[in-house]
Image (cartoon, grey):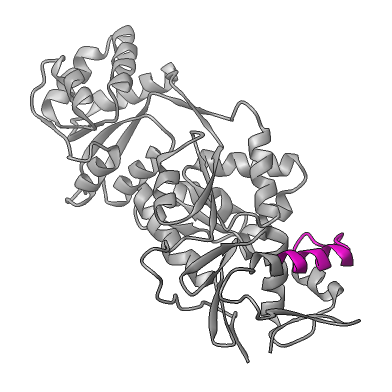
């Protein structure tokens, strides 16, 4: 007998310690780099990742914007200064020198608590004659913000030197905590050099070949949606993000473009990469389908199945057929009914479905299910899960 739990959220089952909680899931990581630390964190918990440089951070300051930020910096006393990099500090002060504000800014530094990301950044502040500098053992900008947010911030003025668009989410978290924040961005966000990477990301979402998209800034989300609109595929991308592909956002800024389209994306508890990973670890396993076939527990994940403690990767076509059949346990589904249950399969013919079933059976060879006909062929009618 087949027992299926496929409606609503499925309680996560106990897993082997050797099998990561995101094993069998694929996450598109949309950041400002081809290979980001977020991908490493996700892979450490079992996920397969697809890196997408959805935005470029160009180390070329917007001089006018920095001058405006410098005026805001010197206008009133500053309580905290967060410096993300030695390079960014030099670029910031170079603009201040050219506009005649450097002495006033260094004076404000002397009145504030200084937080530097790492030793090299702290050395840059010491070269200005400053000695009282705070840092954290992890040497990350995220930890500096965590330190600040753990304290009362209402009424505090914080000046932050930013190196990336993702760090704007940290600034937003400080504002939510009650601080007044002056952002000094020493890098500019620009579209990727090749828009094909965004087109490919949209295609992966539409075809449900990823289970989630991790969006780390407003710019990454905007670029994805704008490219989809340019390709005439915006509706398909949004439909996928509503139904099948989780949109996991680092913070409210990354989520805002999706919310403007009527979506309710997932939000990390904190504007930190490890918090975004925690969000996906909590969310994706809840979307699994759990089957019981002949005493074998089968968990159908995004891009594979788990049989006992063994993960079996499954190609997109075969697993799409399996998920469609699991939605109607025990029922015989015709090829036309399977097509109707699988997005983007309107043009798939009966032979392609037959081949997908064949590949699914081959994929399960050598597992504990070998010899168990999970998907039965009912002549002239279609397919069903074994009963």
Residue, far right: 380
Whether residue 370 is visible here, answered yes or no, is: yes
In this rendering, would 147 be left or right of 295? left
- In the image, residue 217 above or below residue 371: above
Where's residue 370, x and y in %?
Answer: 63, 75
Q: Nearer the viewer, residue 172 or 364?
A: 364
Q: Quadrant of the N terminus?
A: bottom right
> So how many labels did they put on this image?
0
User: Which residues are drawn in magenta?
Assistant: 342-360
Q: Is residue 124 magenta?
A: no
Q: Nearer the viewer, residue 327 or 219?
A: 327
Image spot of residue 341 (x, y percent): 75, 71
Q: In the rendered view, would you say 82 is above or below 42?
A: above
Task: Give how far across and how far down residue 129 sits, in percent.
Answer: 10, 16
Tell me, yes or no, if residue 271 can be seen here: no
Task: Provide residue 273's location: percent of width, then percent of height.
Answer: 38, 47
Q: Residue furthest left?
A: 131
| 353 within the magenta span | yes
Which is more toward the observer, 270 or 360?
A: 360
Horizontal side, residue 5 vs residue 281: left or right? right
Residue positioned 52% across, 51% down in the render: 48
- Asked if 256 appears above or below 55 in the picture, the reply is below
Q: Could you tell me which residue is drawn at 14 percent across and 31 percent down?
A: 112
Q: Quadrant of residue 16?
A: bottom left
On screen, residue 142 versus residue 378, left or right, reads left
Decide: is 330 above or below 355: below
């Amino acid at each position: 007998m087949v027992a299926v739990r496929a409606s609503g959220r499925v309680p996560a089952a106990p897993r082997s310690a050797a099998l990561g909680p995101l094993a069998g899931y694929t996450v598109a990581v949309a950041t400002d780099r081809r290979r980001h630390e977020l991908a490493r964190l996700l892979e450490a918990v079992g996920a397969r990742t697809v890196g997408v440089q959805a935005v470029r951070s160009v180390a070329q300051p917007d001089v006018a914007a920095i001058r405006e930020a410098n005026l805001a910096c010197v206008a009133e006393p500053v309580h905290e200064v967060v410096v993300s990099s030695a390079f960014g500090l030099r670029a910031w002060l170079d603009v201040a020198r050219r506009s005649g504000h450097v002495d006033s800014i260094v004076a404000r530094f002397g009145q504030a608590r200084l937080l530097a990301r790492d030793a090299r950044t702290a050395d840059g502040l010491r070269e200005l004659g400053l000695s009282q500098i705070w840092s954290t053992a992890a040497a990350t900008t995220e930890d500096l913000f965590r330190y600040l947010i753990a304290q009362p911030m209402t009424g505090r003025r914080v000046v932050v030197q930013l190196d990336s668009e993702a760090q704007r989410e940290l600034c937003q978290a400080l504002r939510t905590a009650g601080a007044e924040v002056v952002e000094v961005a020493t890098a500019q966000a620009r579209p990727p050099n090749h828009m094909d990477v965004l087109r490919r990301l949209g295609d992966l979402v539409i075809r449900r070949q990823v289970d989630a998209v991790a969006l780390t800034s407003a710019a990454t989300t905007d670029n994805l949606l704008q490219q989809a609109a340019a390709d005439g595929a915006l509706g398909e991308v949004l439909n996928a993000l509503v139904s099948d592909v989780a949109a996991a956002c680092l913070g409210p800024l990354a989520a805002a473009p999706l919310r403007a389209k009527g979506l309710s994306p997932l939000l990390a508890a904190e504007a930190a990469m490890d918090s975004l990973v925690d969000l996906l670890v909590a969310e994706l396993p809840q979307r699994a389908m759990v089957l019981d076939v002949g005493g074998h527990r089968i968990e159908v994940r995004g891009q594979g199945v788990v049989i006992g403690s063994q993960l079996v990767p499954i190609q997109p076509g075969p697993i799409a057929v399996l998920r469609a059949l699991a939605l109607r346990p025990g029922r015989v589904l015709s090829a036309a009914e399977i097509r109707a249950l699988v997005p983007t399969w309107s043009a798939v013919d009966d032979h392609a479905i037959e081949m997908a079933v064949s590949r699914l059976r081959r994929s399960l060879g050598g597992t504990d299910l070998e010899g168990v006909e999970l998907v039965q062929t009912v002549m002239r009618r279609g397919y069903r899960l074994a009963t």
